[in-house]
Image: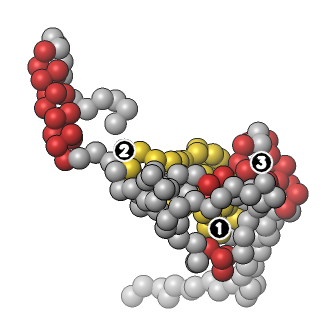
Amino acid sequence: MQPAQTVKVSKRPLRTRICADRPEELLEQLYGRLTAGMLSAFHHTLQLEPQEKDHNISCPTGGRPANDKKYQIPINLNSVSPWSYRISYDPTRYPKYIPEAYCLCKGCLTGAYGEESLRFRSTPVFMPTVILRRTTSCTGGRYVYTEDYVTIPVGCTCVPEHDKEVKEVNSSIGKQAGKLVPGHHHDKPASE
């Protein structure tokens, strides 16, 4: 018969680790050093509209408004590929609020009277940037932040909408060129 095993029970209550967020000023300093003013300048100079207004913005139909010297239309709405902004919120990153552009039109306002043409496609323009991402690690009672590299949409531009025929012609030209180049391998380039 085996001797009875005793189980040691700790009477001390488990301490829950409380981790606080870093002060806003410290995050701003860290972030400022990382970005060297790129996104922070964009973030602080952008005039943001209340979010309720975003829901009513759509692709302008018809002509462009006449240019009034007293009121200047913002570039994002005066573009042939107009865009607006949504606010992206993430409590685990710094900055917590980031404006992200989205295109208002499927096509571009390149018609004779500024109307939408589907011969061109509105597409977002992305900017690479760095943010601070809060981790689950805690040091000195404060959360630890790490650098995280992301791309954010900052505007929209027009690109030609290629016909299926144009794509097929370009594809067959590419295949012919590949056969003509000696030592050409059909592997994907390292950048892909």
- Above or below residue 175? Residue 90 is below
From the viewer's perspective, tell me whether residue 137 is left or right of residue 171. Answer: right
- Give residue 47's position: percent from left, percent from top: 76, 61
Q: Name the residue under label 3.
A: 41
The residue under the point 72% across, 81% down is 14
Q: What residue type is labelled 2?
A: Pro
Which quarter of the rendered picture does the N terminus lie within?
Answer: bottom left
User: Which residue is denoted by mark 2 in the rendering?
Assistant: 160
The CA distance from mark 2 to mark 1 is 29 Å
| Label 3 crowd (10 A; few <14 / some 14-19 / many >=20) | few
Please name whichever residue, 162 or 20, is drawn nearer the observer in this view of the structure: 162
Q: Earlier in the sequence, mark 1 or mark 3?
A: 3
Q: Determine whether the residue tagged by mark 2 lies in a helix, strand or loop.
A: strand
Left or right: 49 with respect to 161? right
Tell me, what colour scheme is on the image? secondary structure
Give whichever of 18, 171 is nearer the camera.
171
Q: Residue at x 78, y 54 (%)?
A: 69
- Callout 3: SS: helix
Seen at 11% across and 19% down, the residue is: 179
Residue type indicated by callout 3? Ala
